[in-house]
Image (cartoon, rainbow, N blue to C red):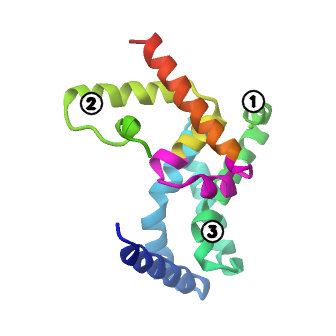
Amino acid sequence: MNSKTQNSLGLKLNLLVLRCQVGDQQAFKELCVQFNPVTRRFLKSLVKSDAASDLNQEVWISVYQRIASLDDVSRFKYWLYQITRNKAMDYFRKSKKLDYFDELTHGTALQLFTTYEDDKNLFYHKQIHKARESLSPKLNEVVELYYFQGMDYEEIALIVGCSMGTVKSRIHNAKHKIKEWLNKNH
């Protein structure tokens, strides 16, 4: 995608958020249609339970209630991811799983994460997803944001609240653990 197209998409999103801020219900529906799958997938990668669906509803209730207070509409995506992540943290805290969560606080080789065209790639795709299940929540979180959401290190650092170096380290560790799991279980 060229920068002109990216700018156009960014402007459209900014306008959509602005419309939501002034109470445009149709704009909010459009925002939900566009980003609900993203928040749902992110929550499922963090929570790994049936609670993800309920948490996703809570995310969108929070977005609806608080969107008018978003000062910089160009930061909507980061703001949305932070709300989503905070809902997962609240879930862990309430279910006494926070200690575990805290304790654990766009390359071609991993394109298998998102694409598969034949049976062999489908097999590898499934294996990689099984390997992801063995990752700690903190590692899985950065894998989700980097490989599935296409974010860069700086964006991820803003969302998870750590340094870029920590993000790079977590991605490196996650790739290493996935390779280890694949070698052991193949």
Please tell me whether mark 2 sits on a helix, a strand or a loop: helix
Res 20 quadrant in image: bottom right
Q: Mark 1 or mark 2: which comes first in sequence?
A: 1
**10 Å crowding of disc 1: few (<14), some (14-19), many (20+):** some
Q: Please, what is the three-letter code of the amino acid marked with disc 2?
A: Asn
- Can you tell which mark lies on residue 121? 2
- Can you tell which mark lies on residue 100? 1
| Residue 179 vertical placement versus 142 (above, below) | above
Name the quadrant of the C terminus: top left
Q: Is residue 24 left or right of residue 166?
A: left
Residue shown at 51%/51% (left/top)?
A: 40
Q: Is residue 47 visible?
A: no
Q: Magenta stretch: residue 112 in it?
A: no
Please tell me whether mark 3 sits on a helix, a strand or a loop: helix
Q: Magenta stretch: residue 157 in it?
A: yes
Give the x, y percent position of residue 161. Answer: 74, 52
Q: Which residues are magenta?
A: 145-164
| Residue 164 vertical placement versus 170 (above, below) | below
**10 Å crowding of disc 2: few (<14), some (14-19), many (20+):** some
Res 109 quadrant in image: top left
| Residue 11 vertical placement versus 186 (above, below) | below
Give the x, y percent position of residue 107. Answer: 42, 42
Give the x, y percent position of residue 85. Answer: 66, 51
Residue denoted by label 3: 63
Question: CA separation, marks 3 and 1?
Answer: 27 Å
Q: Is residue 111 left or right of residue 184?
A: left
Q: Please, what is the three-letter code of the amino acid marked with disc 3?
A: Val
Q: Nearer the viewer, residue 15 or 120?
A: 120
Eye-nearest disc, 1 or 2: 2
Res 113 quadrant in image: top left
Residue shown at 68%/77% (left/top)?
A: 70
Please tell me whether mark 1 sits on a helix, a strand or a loop: helix
